[in-house]
Amino acid sequence: MRNASFVSPMINPLSLNLEQYVRLSPEDRDALDELRTSRLIEARARTDLVREGDRPDVVRLMVSGWACRYKDLPDGRRQIVGLFIPGEFCDLNVYILQRMDHSIGAITKVQYYAMGPEVVQRLTQNRPRVGQALLWHELVTTSVQREWLLNLGQRSAIERVAHLLIEMFYRLRATGHTRGHTFDLPLTQNDLADATGITAVHVNRTLQELRRDNLIAFERKQLTILDLDRMMKLAIFNPNYLHLDQEGRHLDANA
Amino acid sequence: MRNASFVSPMINPLSLNLEQYVRLSPEDRDALDELRTSRLIEARARTDLVREGDRPDVVRLMVSGWACRYKDLPDGRRQIVGLFIPGEFCDLNVYILQRMDHSIGAITKVQYYAMGPEVVQRLTQNRPRVGQALLWHELVTTSVQREWLLNLGQRSAIERVAHLLIEMFYRLRATGHTRGHTFDLPLTQNDLADATGITAVHVNRTLQELRRDNLIAFERKQLTILDLDRMMKLAIFNPNYLHLDQEGRHLDANA
DNA sequence: CGTCTATTTGAGCCCCGTCAAAGGCGGTGG
DNA sequence: CCACCGCCTTTGACGGGGCTCAAATAGACG
């Protein structure tokens, strides 16, 4: 929570998110603050922000609520390929492509800034360190996708679910969205199923097993990780892929 | 195979690859040709080019042979999260990160150019259109990762294997590495297993089923797709995610 | 021609999917 | 504020797709 007082409350999540990677200068933060002049859009839970096949137009910066990136098959099968929490960009670069190859859906009610690509381009040109941070953000997102591939391809059902829960804990904690080992997890068991590639019924049994073993508590969309060590061992969780811990220190404003 | 005569035989695969997205000018091609002054490195089959945890140093451009990106777990489970064919970069951007979050291994004997990040940076600065093409290349690689997530999370064993085979057919055909519906597939059944998240034994049975249904022929590392239509239907394959078909036309040299 | 790796086959079984139905909970409208 | 409705969670029984273990066969390579 470095220098939280320097940034406006609304855009706060973004600079907090980026400062995981790079320490920003006051000028950098001011430039980020100007994104607040973008259109602020609200979408209801369970609606799509963009659909596969659409022509991408704007870049979206999540302000509140959870969203997901997903792909589906004609017969209804659906795979969530990424989750977005406040402060994260959904689609920094995909506007380069002609057509969306995936959809973005709101899990909860969401608020986001929608800005033209030129706004981001101007920002990265004027503030190179912000540009570096955004690139970092993209690279980490891609790294997370790779870890999810490992998750789906190699881990068992209980390992997958545990791994996802720990990842979200780490990501939320990095931006101050946790209280101790507790955080809001607005996903339904159906969502968890679509993200882990197992069925909702089996997600249910898996969560019960995690509860029975006193590894988690989960009620009213509040998740508590009761024993992080044992959970990490169970999930074979190694946080390296999140590239946290101020790895971007060498890019710092005062370096 | 546009203008293949304009480019040197050695670097050919790269510009061919990039021209899937953007039509390059002669100057662009010349600039790409200069990458040939980079160190050309050879590695034996089944060796690692980089390992998870290493500090990334160089950018690798595949010249010949196949390589893969993979992640593994302490207990030996291994997931291949991407395949590289000649003309593709393994790790255009990952040098930005402090530590590799995955490994890169040679499937066959491989040759690749190893260049310092500054070489790529200079190239993209001097030749913006090449920079665009490289960005495109990265975005498509990421899109492929998302499709693989869908593959692992939602498709059955036979669908997964069929999907992977068709994808490699499309990617190889785009750079002229196919003869009719036949191409070299140097993967072992173990590799296919690690890429699709099923066991090698079951890959074997799956391939037999594909053969029995006269969908493929596969011997001596030569794969033929006997009935592409039925294969695509079986795999629920939609090539959109590869963003082929000169989507980058609007960035063309003469646009 | 021998060795090592890759492919193939078989038997048994288990993790997880499927189908179906019963509770629980939150949200909405009267 | 209550009652209803829809979605979410939970439970049970059953079946099957894919895993495991093990061993035989076939190729590849020196």
Image (cartoon, coloured by chain):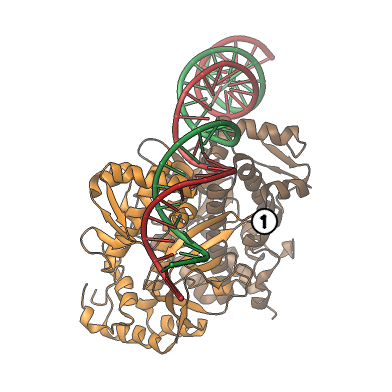
Chain colours: A brown, B orange, C green, D red
Say which of B235 and B225 sits in front. Answer: B225
| Residue that appears at 73% across and 34% down | A211
| Residue that appears at 23% across and 77% down | B254
Identify the chain of the residue marked 1, using the numbered disc in the image.
A
Residue A58 at x, y = what percent?
43, 57
| Residue that appears at 43% across and 75% down | B110
Q: Residues within 10 Å of mark 1 (few under 14, many from 20)?
A: few
What's the amino acid at mark 1?
Answer: Pro
Residue A176 at x, y = what percent?
72, 54
Quarter occupied by residue B248: bottom left
Q: Quadrant of the N terminus of chain B?
A: bottom left
Say which of B153 and A177 sits in front. Answer: B153
Query: Would residue B217 be visible to someone looking at this image?
Result: yes
Say which of C21 and A136 sits in front. Answer: C21
- The relative height of residue B38 versus residue B99 in the rendered view (above or below) is below
Of helix, strand and loop, which one carries label 1? Answer: loop
Q: Quadrant of the C terminus of chain B?
A: bottom left
- The relative height of residue B159 versus residue B42 in the rendered view (above or below) is above
Residue A131 at x, y = what percent?
54, 72
Say which of A238 and A255 sits in front. Answer: A238
Query: In this figure, which residue is indicated by the disc labeled 1?
Result: A9
| Residue that appears at 21% across and 74% down | B2
Residue A35 at x, y = what percent?
54, 62
